Image: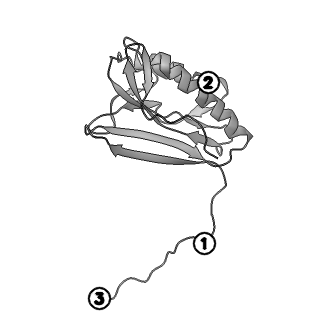
Amino acid sequence: MPFARRTRRAATRPRCSRRPRSCSSTGAGPGGHWVEVSRALGTPNAEVERMNEAYDEYFEAAKGALRPGATAHDAHRAVSKGFSERGYQLGHVTGHSIGMTMIEFPKIGEGVETELAENMVFSLHPHAIAENGHDCLYMQETWLVGADGGIPLSGLESKIYR
């Protein structure tokens, strides 16, 4: 039987816009638990710069919101505030618990009343989408619920790498 004829080839030039890209890293650490970390790469336009300001606010808000006794709903509201105040829509979910099976419950989102406990681990990834439906920004961070608030685990600055 002859092999199928090749119909696709590598692109020789970019076929998409020059908006920032998200660079993702997902893997199991020494304890077998998954992590999610991504940052955007590229030169942002003015709209994406505004989104990045909201990401700065989310990162700081998560440090206070991810604390024992808070609900997943409370955490969602705190970290999404900067996005919603700027008129951005958010993607499917603000975040989720992360562990041995990658995506676990509870999710961090509207109406989720699960109470957070110390040492829970979450991936937060607010997906900001502009009204034009074209500009967006998506970055991830894995967080530990500490006794005094959220602790980002990657050690990476929350920023767009240019």
Disc 3 or 1, which lies upstream in sequence?
3
Disc 2 or 1, which lies upstream in sequence?
1
Question: In what element is the residue under mark 1?
Answer: loop
Residue that extends furthest to the top in the rendered view of this protein: 69
Query: Which of the 4 image quadrants contains residue 13?
Result: bottom right
Question: In what element is the residue under mark 2?
Answer: helix
Residue kind at label 1, given as amino acid type: Thr
Between circles 2 and 3, the one closer to the viewer is 2
Residue kind at label 2, given as amino acid type: Gly
Label 1 packing within 10 angstroms: few (<14), some (14-19), many (20+): few
Distance CA(mark 2)–CA(mark 3): 59 Å
Left or right of residue 102, residue 51 in this image: right
Identify the colour scheme used: one colour
> Compared to 73, does 143 lie above or below?
below
The residue that disc 3 covers is: 1
Q: Which mark is residue 82?
A: 2
List x then y, in percent, for residue 110.
Answer: 46, 23
Label 3 packing within 10 angstroms: few (<14), some (14-19), many (20+): few
List x then y, in percent, for residue 146.
Answer: 38, 18
The residue that disc 1 covers is: 12
Residue that extends furthest to the bottom in the rendered view of this protein: 2
